[in-house]
Image: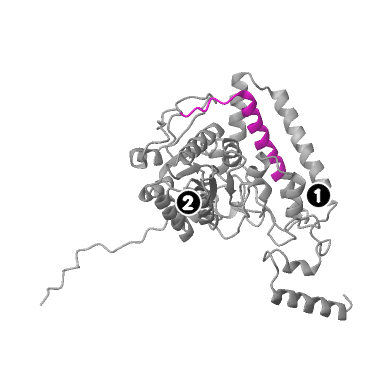
C-alpha cells in the first residue's frame, strides 16, 4: 500500500498576482526596465536562421542615443528629406488625434482613440514598407493611413459616420477600411487581423506575387488564441509577413504583466515558433524603420516571418471612454525612459543641421491648419446627433457581393412597413 507523503513541513502554495510598478498616488518608476546603450545590439544578416538570433528577442534595437545621434549597425542612414517627411507625418498624426479627441468631447462623435507617444510605430513602419504591401492594423495605427497620404476628410467622415462615410456608419469610429490604400478593415475583436494577415501573405506567395503583409496588435492581445494560430501558420509555411506587437505597457487598465510581460519579453514568444524575433525601441523612429526594413527584406527573400516587439508607452488613456488616472500614476508618462518619438526625431534633425526651431514651429502650425480645414470639410457632411445619415435600407448592403433572395425579401418588407407607417 502506498505511503502517504508527509506534508506538515511543506510551505503553503501561493499564487502570484502581477502588480504594476506604481498605482495612482504612488511615485512613478521604471527602474525595472533595462535600456541598453544605443547601437550595441547586433544586426544579423536578414537571411540568418531564427535559431541563431534568439538573443535579439531579449535586447532592444536602438539607433538614437541619449543625445539624439544615430549610431550602431541598425542605423538606416536615411536621407534628411525622408527624416523630415517622417517627422511631419508624426506631427500630422498627433494634430489629427488632438482635433478628433476634442470633437468627441464636443459630442460630434461617439468614440476616439489617440496614438500619443506611439506615432513612430506606425509612421516609420509605413515609410519602410512599399505602398503595395498589405496592412492589417489594430485600432491605434491611424498613422499608417496618414503616411500613405490618405485623405483626412475621408477618415473624418468615417469617424463622424456621416453621409459621406464610405462604410455607411457600420463601423465603430476609427475602425477604418481602405482597400485603395491596401489597408485592411480594422476589427474591435483583438488579434483577428493576425491570422488574416498570415493568410493573405500565404496567398501572395502561392500566387508568386511580390507583395508582403504586415500586422499589428497590442501586448495584451498576445494572450488571444488568434495570436498563436497566426504564429503557427506563419512559421510552418514561412509566410512573408511582419508580425508587430505594440507593447505600450497597458491593455486598457491591465498592465503588461497580466499578459506575461513580467516573466519575459513579448518578442520571446516568437522563439518557440521558430520565428525570427526582434525587440525594438518603439519611440525611436530610426530603429522602427530599420527593423521593419530588415524584416521586409527577410520576407521578400523567402526567409519567412519576423516578429517585432515595439517597446513603447501609451501616453493617453486607452480611449475617450477611459480614465488612466484611475489605475496608473499621474507622473508615469513623464517618467517613461524612452522619451517622446517626435521630440527625439526633431532633435536628431537639429543635430544634423537639417532642421531648426522656426521650421518646426511652422510645421506644427501648418499641420494644425491642415487638420482644421479637413474637419470643416467633413462636418459639412454631418456629425453625431444630426440624425440618420444613410437610408435604412443600406443596412442590407455590403454583406454579400450579390444580395441573396432572403435579404432582398427582408428589405422589401422593411420598406413596405416604413411606407405604411408614413416614415
Instruction: Please name the residue that numbered disc 2 is placed on.
Output: 256
Q: Position of residue 11 (x, y in %)?
A: 25, 62
Quarter residue 166 falls in: bottom right
Give the left or right position of residue 394, taking residue 196 as reference. right
Q: Position of residue 101 (x, y in %)?
A: 71, 49
- Badge 2 vs badge 1, beta-carbon distance below 8 Å: no
Q: Main secondary structure of the magenta part?
A: helix
- Depth-wise, is mark 2 or mark 1 nearer the camera? 1
Indicate the secondary structure of the residue bearing disc 2: helix
Question: Which residue appears at 50% of the width and 42% of the height?
Answer: 310
Residue 215 vertical position relative to residue 188 in the rendered view, above or below: above
In the rendering, which numbered label is found on residue 378? 1
Q: Residues within 10 Å of mark 1 (few under 14, many from 20)?
A: many
Residue nearest the observer in this picture, 62 or 290:
290
In the rendering, which numbered label is found on residue 38? none
**Could you tell me if residue 222 is visible in this image?**
yes
Quarter residue 189 falls in: bottom right
Quarter residue 73 falls in: top left
Sequence order check: which comes first, mark 2 or mark 1?
2
Q: Position of residue 250 (x, y in %)?
A: 53, 51
For this orientation, the residue located farthest to the front is 208
Give the left or right position of residue 374, taking residue 70 as reference. right
For the C terminus, give its image quadrant.
bottom right
Magenta span of residues: 74-97
Q: Is residue 99 magenta?
A: no
For this orientation, the residue located farthest to the top is 353
Residue nearest the observer in this picture, 358 or 291:
291
For the N terminus, give its image quadrant.
bottom left
Count of picture labels: 2
* Alpha-carbon span between mark 2 and mark 1: 37 Å
Indicate the secondary structure of the residue bearing disc 1: helix
Amino acid at each position: 500500500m502506498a505511503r502517504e507523503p508527509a506534508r506538515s513541513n511543506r510551505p503553503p502554495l501561493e499564487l502570484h498576482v502581477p502588480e504594476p510598478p506604481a498605482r495612482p498616488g504612488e511615485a512613478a518608476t521604471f527602474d525595472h526596465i533595462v535600456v541598453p546603450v544605443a547601437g550595441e545590439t547586433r544586426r544579423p544578416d536578414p537571411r540568418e536562421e531564427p535559431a541563431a538570433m534568439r538573443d535579439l528577442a531579449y535586447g532592444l534595437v536602438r539607433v538614437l542615443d541619449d543625445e539624439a545621434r544615430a549610431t550602431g549597425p541598425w542605423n538606416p542612414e536615411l536621407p534628411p528629406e525622408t527624416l523630415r517627411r517622417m517627422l511631419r507625418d508624426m506631427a500630422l498624426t498627433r494634430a489629427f488625434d488632438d482635433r478628433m479627441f476634442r470633437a468627441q468631447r464636443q459630442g460630434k462623435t461617439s468614440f476616439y482613440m489617440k496614438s500619443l507617444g506611439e506615432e513612430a510605430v506606425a509612421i516609420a513602419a509605413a515609410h519602410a514598407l512599399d505602398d503595395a504591401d498589405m496592412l492589417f492594423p489594430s485600432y491605434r495605427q491611424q498613422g499608417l493611413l496618414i503616411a500613405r497620404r490618405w485623405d483626412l476628410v475621408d477618415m473624418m467622415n468615417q469617424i463622424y459616420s456621416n453621409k459621406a462615410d464610405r462604410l455607411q456608419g457600420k463601423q465603430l469610429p476609427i475602425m477604418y477600411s481602405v482597400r485603395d490604400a491596401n489597408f485592411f478593415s480594422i476589427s474591435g475583436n483583438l488579434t483577428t487581423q493576425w491570422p488574416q494577415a498570415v493568410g493573405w501573405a500565404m496567398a501572395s506567395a502561392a500566387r508568386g506575387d511580390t507583395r508582403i503583409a504586415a500586422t499589428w496588435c497590442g501586448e495584451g492581445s498576445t494572450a488571444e488564441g488568434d495570436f498563436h494560430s497566426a504564429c503557427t501558420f506563419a512559421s510552418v509555411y514561412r509566410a512573408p509577413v511582419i508580425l508587430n506587437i505594440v507593447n505600450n505597457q497597458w491593455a486598457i487598465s491591465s498592465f503588461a504583466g497580466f499578459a506575461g510581460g513580467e516573466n519575459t519579453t513579448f518578442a520571446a514568444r516568437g522563439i518557440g515558433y521558430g520565428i525570427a524575433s526582434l525587440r525594438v525601441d518603439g519611440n525611436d523612429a530610426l530603429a522602427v524603420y530599420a527593423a521593419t526594413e530588415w524584416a521586409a527584406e527577410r520576407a521578400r527573400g523567402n526567409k519567412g516571418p519576423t516578429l517585432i516587439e515595439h517597446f513603447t508607452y501609451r501616453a493617453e488613456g486607452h480611449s475617450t471612454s477611459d480614465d488612466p488616472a484611475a489605475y496608473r500614476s499621474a507622473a508615469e508618462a513623464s517618467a517613461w525612459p524612452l522619451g517622446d518619438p517626435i521630440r527625439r526625431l526633431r532633435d536628431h534633425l537639429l543635430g544634423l543641421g537639417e532642421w531648426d526651431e522656426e521650421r518646426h514651429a511652422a510645421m506644427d502650425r501648418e499641420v494644425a491648419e491642415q487638420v482644421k480645414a479637413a474637419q470643416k470639410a467633413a462636418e459639412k457632411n454631418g456629425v453625431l446627433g444630426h440624425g440618420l445619415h444613410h437610408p435604412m435600407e443600406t443596412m442590407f448592403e455590403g454583406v454579400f457581393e450579390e444580395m441573396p433572395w432572403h435579404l432582398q425579401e427582408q428589405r422589401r418588407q422593411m420598406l413596405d412597413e416604413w411606407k405604411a407607417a408614413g416614415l
